[in-house]
Amino acid sequence: MSREINLQSVAEFSSQTALRPRLLLAGTHSGVGKTTLTLGLLAALRKRGLAVQGFKAGPDYIDPSYHTAVTHRPARNLDRFMVGEDGVREIFWRASADADLSVIEGVMGLYDGRDVKENVGSSAELALLLQSPIILVIDASGMARSAAALVLGFQKLLESVPIAGVLVNRVGSIGHYRIVQTAIEQECNVPTVGYLPKMADVAIPERHLGLIPALERGELSPLFDLLAKRIEESVDVARLLEIAQGASALSEPSAVIFTKKEKQTQVKIAIAKDAAFNFYYPENLELLELAGADLHYFSPLAGDLLPDDVDGLYIGGGFPEEFAGDLSARTELLLQLYGKIKGGLPTFAECGGYMFLAKEIVDRAGKRHPMVGVIPATVKMQENLAALGYREATALVDHLLLAQGETVKGHEFHYSTLTYELDSPPYAYEVKGLRGKKVDGFSTNTLVAGYTHLHFASNPAVVQRFIHACAVYQKTRTVAAKGE
């Protein structure tokens, strides 16, 4: 169904500073097929020789991992709650600068966000903020003319939202698609740009069981190739490119996040990065580098030891429970981490990292796996989701990342609970979400850990405070090494 397109013209178009060809794929509801269509489109565009930048609305880590695997470019989250409108514009501008096209995957349904009475946090709000054309994904199963009523309702709810085309998913046949297409284009005055049939042979893997290592090993490449093939067969890719190119020009935003300091302190921060620990906002790492950090990546799963000259430690989220036995067996590393953290190494650990620093993880089968042990607590896995949602974290005391009373934003998503052995644990934050407030985490003078995934761009002072603590440790470490 695709048409020929001049790739050189696309590159020339996107190289102009104020033009950022872009599309936002939004759904009528969760489960409509946004991820499948986004991955297929990304793969098809890349096979055409285009540099494609993937984005995800909201705080999701998994979908950006898919995007990164397909495009071979770090995918980005666009989240107004976390970084504000100016931050969203800046992140989009920087990441899309050398891309021929940007594809943004929406979240839930087009108008679903933090409040049913308004569009805050929704894909619709993001599209308006970035002036991005929307491709609305619908599930046409069991529908004919009613598909037009569905699309028309999405158009009428907020007429300023730029729905530029419709992708029809899960059609029964080409004849079924033609019926749906005729109804939508007649009643809604918007083009349908293609379809995907019901595909029994295509399934996106479980989102939390071994997904990251499978991506890293390239095991999902055949799936991406198949999706690209299906997209090319039944989606008008050239029309989508035309719609993306028709997006209005953007003005370069002010730098509100990535502002380089004139004076920098050079420190080395170890970053845990492997199949067990891999959930990091790229901006968190980039802000650390911008502030003077030399990032040293190591694999706890491989038993990599920290170098002697490390000045700080950052252990992000992931799935340590899926590798608990392997992590527990890395006794030399566990002992080293225990000694260094107890010895004052500035350390930040979030979610999976928080679990790793606890005394033990009890898996779903009830087996106990010893961990680092600097946090006197037991983590127990459970079948049901324990927490999900945005968080605003306020420091209960002065600590490594925040002064008492300062706040930073983040989100929480985990299937475990943590129980302290202490009667009065030194909690790191009071966290506020839609369902109220609670305490979270663990803190000492040089350690902060908690379930909340923090976005440093929501409060860049977090970075400066962490770097300063690393610099103080560096000085102490250097003096001790010289025997002074």
Image (cartoon, rainbow, N blue to C red):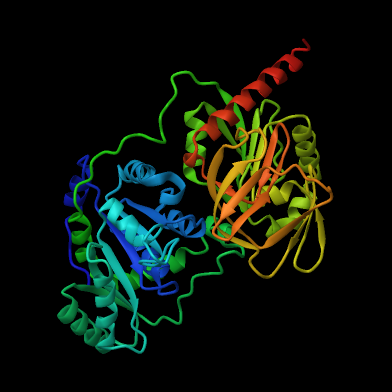
Q: From this viewpoint, is residue 101 visible? A: no
Q: Position of residue 193 (x, y in %)?
A: 23, 72
**In this view of the protein, which residue sits in the foreground, 409 or 361?**
409
Judged left or right of residue 321, residue 367 is right
| Residue drawn at 64 percent across, 57 percent down | 319
Asked which quadrant contains residue 217, the reply is: bottom right
The quadrant in which the C terminus is found is: top right
Is the N terminus in the top left, top right, bottom left or bottom right quadrant? bottom left
Q: Is residue 206 or residue 159 the one in the foreground? A: 159
In this view, 260 is above or below 361: above
Identify the image quadrant of residue 465. Answer: top right
Q: 88 left or right of 481? A: left
Task: Identify the residue at horizontal 47%, vertical 37% (top origin).
Answer: 286
**Quarter-of-image position of residue 35:** bottom left
Q: Looking at the picture, does residue 79 appear above or below residue 243? A: above
Q: Position of residue 248 (x, y in %)?
A: 19, 51
Q: Is residue 303 visible?
A: yes
Give the image location of residue 316, x and y in percent.
61, 46
Give how far across and how far down residue 226 sits, in percent.
Answer: 40, 70
Number of numbered tags placed on the structure image: 0
